[in-house]
Image: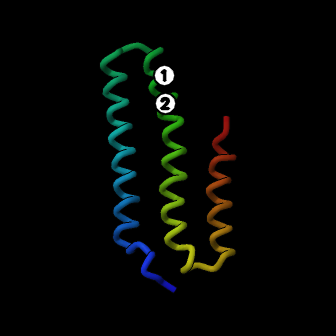
Amino acid sequence: MRGWYRVSEFKVLASMVLLRFLSASVEVTAALLMLRWRTVAQALRINAALGLFGPILFITVSAIGLVHLADQMPWYRLLVILAGVLLVFIGTRG
């Protein structure tokens, strides 16, 4: 049931890919900044910022994909995927 308001699959995929490229760029930039400042304290600060950025990006990319697939999948499969995302966060808590 695709209406005129639905975004094409290519646009959804492109936005997911672009967000991942953005993430990779941020990671490489952070590594270069760590090398430039050459202190463990600064490296930990940069790493802490990445620790916040990573999960936000993970949720955003997952949400984009799930919203696109919402009308193509049964509701119980979407719940299983959502549970998987939540389990990743629960499993990686410190």
Give me the C-alpha separation between circle 2 and circle 1.
6 Å
> Which quarter of the rendered picture does the C terminus lie within?
top right
Identified at 63% across, 70% down, the residue is 78
At label 2, counting other C-alpha atoms closer than 10 Å, the crowd grade (few under 14, some 14-19, many 20 or more) is few
From the image, tell me which residue sits under label 1: 45
Secondary structure found at label 2: helix
User: Which amino acid lies under the numbered mark 2 shown in the image of this protein?
Assistant: Ala
Return the residue found at the far bottom.
1
Q: Is residue 89 left or right of residue 12?
A: right
Identified at 44% across, 17% down, the residue is 42
From the image, tell me which residue sits under label 2: 49
Q: Is residue 76 left or right of residue 32?
A: right
Identified at 52% across, 28% down, the residue is 48
Q: Position of residue 72 (x, y in %)?
A: 54, 80
Labels 2 and 1 touching (C-beta < 8 A): yes
User: Which amino acid lies under the numbered mark 1 shown in the image of this protein?
Assistant: Arg
Q: Considering only vertical position in the picture, is 20 above or below 13?
A: above
